[in-house]
């Protein structure tokens, strides 16, 4: 029981550190000015993406080496998702009626 807990905590620690480094690298390379809240949200997105990627890798029974690469790529790409969702929300908030009309315009 105790060995399982230690293994679980070690794996979560690795995921969190990998996610933190991926988000920090992505933010540093982007060249844009970043607030602490944006950085914090990006790290949270990277942790969530890494956790989902790890769960998917365990479900698919992937090799440990491949699993590390998949988790790293997911953690690195996660802040881009946050930026994309933020841009989409801003575009919709400018004219929500137009967005709704575009959605309901295409009827099958």
Image (spheres, rainbow, N blue to C red):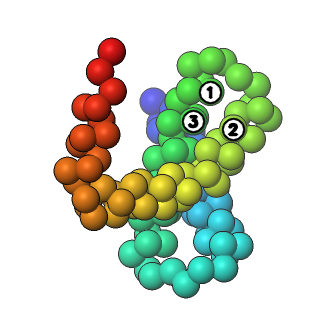
Q: Report the Cα–Cα distance between label 2 and label 3.
A: 7 Å
Task: Label 3, secondary structure: give it.
Answer: helix
Query: What residue occupies the far right of the structure in this picture?
Result: 65
Residue at 71% across / 22% down in the picture? 62
Callout 2: few (<14), some (14-19), or many (20+) C-alpha neighbours within 10 Å? Answer: some
Whether pointer 2 and pointer 3 mark residues with C-beta atoms closer than 8 Å, the reply is: yes
Other-residue count near label 3 (Cα within 10 Å), few / some / many at <14 / 14–19 / ≥20: many
Image quadrant where one finds the C terminus: top left
Dot placed on the residue nearer the N-terminal end, 1 or 2? 1
Query: In this rendering, does residue 16 appear at all?
Result: no
* Callout 1 touching callout 2 (CB < 8 Å): yes
Q: Is 104 on the left-hand or right-hand side of 82?
A: left
Q: How many numbered circles does the render carry? A: 3
Give how far across and how far down residue 102 sits, in percent.
31, 40
- Which residue position holds label 1? 57
Q: Secondary structure at mark 2?
A: helix
Q: Which residue is mark 2?
A: 70
**Residue sitting at x 76%, y 25%:** 63
Compared to residue 89, the image places residue 55 above or below, namely above
């Amino acid at each position: 029981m105790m060995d399982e807990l230690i293994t679980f905590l070690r794996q979560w620690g690795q995921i969190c550190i990998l996610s933190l480094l991926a988000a920090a690298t992505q933010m540093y390379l982007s060249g844009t000015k970043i607030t602490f809240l944006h950085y914090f949200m990006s790290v949270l997105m990277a942790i969530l993406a890494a956790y989902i990627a790890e769960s998917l890798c365990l479900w698919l029974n992937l090799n440990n080496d491949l699993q590390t690469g998949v988790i790293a790529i997911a953690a690195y790409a996660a802040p881009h998702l946050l930026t994309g969702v933020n841009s989409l929300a801003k575009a919709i908030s400018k004219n929500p009626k137009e967005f709704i009309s575009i959605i309901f315009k295409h009827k099958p």
